[in-house]
Image: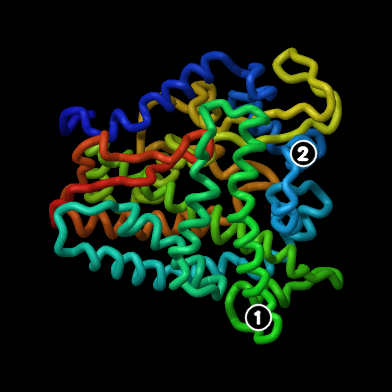
């Protein structure tokens, strides 16, 4: 840092980043005996794992605890599928969720972000999660899907239950996961019912929203079933909005900790896309992706049998000195920036363009409206459980207007 003393944000993620640095130093492959998984930690290794779905399957159902309430979601959640079924569902969804659809949302995102910031225009201090980083993406996605944005309090309850990670430590074992799944089963059941009702209403009265387009999508005579649409809609509604909420909150923390970067972005707003990528590299919301070996493999000199759980560690890959110059330096001018936060290969994050668009618009408005954004006290920042998602849950800000 060059322009002010140590900020509150510097200490918020210190411990977590320190663990990632220690892990990176232990790489490229290590065995985590507690979790019973092999961790792939370098950029080259993680890229190779994610690029080979035939060897490293995304379908973890055989290794995960069973929970009947999750079956409906699995039917349409292509994140947990392998080819050829993955390709079929992704093709169908791609017909409805096109780049043109995302680009067309820009005016609405700008208007919403402006309205949300207008609501705190008379305050010198507010919680930016409550004011902006949560409501913006959830309203955008709700309107996109045609579900009532007025129900966003309910969606927030769902997300809080699914991503709280209550009872999970830094390295949960299978028993911990079983307890966590059982705890969120009622929430999943409620989501199932809500979304199935919404989809059935749309079948009776199709609209021009994304749900209506999903119902009409067809490839080689195949259409999505109601249950498959539930899986995708739930993925977009819950996981989609929480990822953008995390990205925006993490960006505010990063810019508070690096005021020189914030000053540069105010002077040169054209650098915002690069800044968003650096925040994604620095603090990936979901720092690990699980995979299952489909055959015997050799990783880092270790022979792994079929059905072994492998963790592709995005956070350590994003700090690999073999791939990034000065990997432990936050640099909004970094180019190129081949981070893996949105994944790689056939499972590259479907919602990445929307998350990037929302982040660019919201951060531009924040920087234009406020001459200074400061986290007054890191002790007031409440984080999500980083074993589930890397993100602030509460993030008080003190602001000074431009």
- Mark 2 crowdedness (10 Å alpha carbons): few <14, some 14-19, many ≥20: many
- Secondary structure under tag 2 reads strand
Q: What is the x, y in percent for residue 108?
A: 41, 72
Q: Is residue 220 visible?
A: yes
Question: Could you say which disc has been placed on residue 340 in the image?
Answer: none
User: Which is nearer the eye, 383 or 222?
Assistant: 383
Question: Residue 70 appears at what percent x and percent y?
Answer: 70, 52
Question: In the image, residue 134 lies at what x, y percent?
Answer: 40, 57
Residue corresponding to mark 1: 201
Q: Which residue sits at x=83%, y=52%?
A: 84
For label 1, count other residues whose C-alpha is less than 10 Å away and answer few (under 14), some (14-19) or many (20+).
Answer: few
Which residue is at a point 34% across and 52% down the rendered structure image? Answer: 129
Separation (CA) of disc 1 from disc 2 = 35 Å
The residue lying toward the viewer, choosing from 302 and 120, is 120
Q: Which residue is mark 2?
A: 57
How many numbered marks have been drawn onto this rendered protein structure? Answer: 2
> Image quarter for residue 334?
top left
Specify the quadrant that holds the N terminus. top left
Q: Nearer the viewer, mark 1 or mark 2?
A: 1
Q: SS class of the residue under badge 1?
A: helix
- Residue 19 coordinates in the image, percent (x, y): 46, 21
Q: Is residue 202 above or below residue 329?
A: below
Residue 338, can we see it? no
Rendered residue at 18%/52% (across/down) = 125
For the C terminus, the quadrant is bottom left
Residue 13 horizontal side relative to residue 97, left or right: left
Decide if residue 275 is on the left or right side of residue 122.
right
In the rendered view, would you say 229 is above or below 349? below
- Residue 282 location, quadrant: top left
Q: Nearest the camera: 239 or 371?
A: 239
In the image, residue 171 sits, relative to residue 84, either above or below, namely above
Residue 277, relative to residue 100: is it above or below? Answer: above
């Amino acid at each position: 840092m060059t322009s002010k003393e140590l900020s509150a944000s510097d200490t918020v993620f210190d411990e977590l980043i320190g663990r990632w640095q220690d892990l990176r130093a232990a790489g490229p492959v290590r065995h985590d005996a507690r979790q019973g998984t092999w961790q792939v930690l370098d950029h080259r290794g993680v890229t190779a794992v994610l690029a080979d779905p035939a060897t490293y399957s995304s379908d973890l159902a055989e290794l995960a605890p069973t929970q009947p309430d999750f079956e409906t979601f699995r039917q349409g959640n292509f994140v947990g599928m392998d080819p050829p079924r993955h390709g079929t569902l992704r093709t169908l969804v791609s017909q409805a969720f096109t780049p043109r659809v995302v680009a067309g949302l820009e005016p609405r995102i700008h208007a919403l972000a402006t309205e949300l910031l207008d609501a705190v225009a008379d305050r010198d201090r507010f919680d930016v999660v409550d004011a902006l980083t949560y409501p913006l993406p959830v309203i955008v996605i709700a309107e996109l899907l045609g579900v009532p944005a007025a129900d966003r309090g309910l969606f927030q309850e769902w997300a809080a239950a699914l991503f709280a990670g209550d009872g999970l430590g830094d390295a949960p074992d299978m028993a911990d996961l079983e307890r966590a799944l059982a705890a969120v089963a009622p929430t999943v059941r409620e989501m199932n019912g809500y979304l199935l009702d919404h989809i059935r209403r749309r079948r009776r009265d199709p609209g021009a929203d994304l749900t209506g387009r999903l119902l009409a999508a067809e490839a080689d005579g195949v259409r999505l079933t109601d249950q498959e649409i539930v899986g995708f809609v739930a993925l977009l509604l819950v996981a989609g909005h929480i990822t953008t909420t995390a990205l925006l909150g993490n960006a505010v923390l990063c810019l508070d900790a690096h005021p020189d970067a914030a000053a540069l972005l105010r002077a040169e707003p054209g650098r915002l896309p690069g800044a968003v990528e650096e925040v994604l590299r620095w603090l990936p919301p979901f720092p690990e992706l699980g995979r299952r070996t489909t055959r015997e493999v050799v990783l880092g000199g270790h022979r792994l049998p079929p059905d072994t759980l492998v963790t592709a560690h995005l956070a350590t890959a994003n700090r690999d000195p073999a791939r990034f110059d000065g990997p432990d330096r936050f640099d909004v001018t970094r180019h190129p920036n081949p981070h893996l936060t949105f994944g790689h290969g056939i499972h590259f994050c479907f919602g990445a363009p929307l998350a990037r668009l929302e982040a660019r618009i919201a951060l531009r408005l924040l920087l234009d409206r406020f001459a200074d954004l400061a986290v007054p006290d890191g002790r007031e920042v409440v984080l999500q459980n980083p074993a589930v998602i890397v993100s602030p849950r509460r993030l008080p800000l003190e602001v000074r207007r431009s």
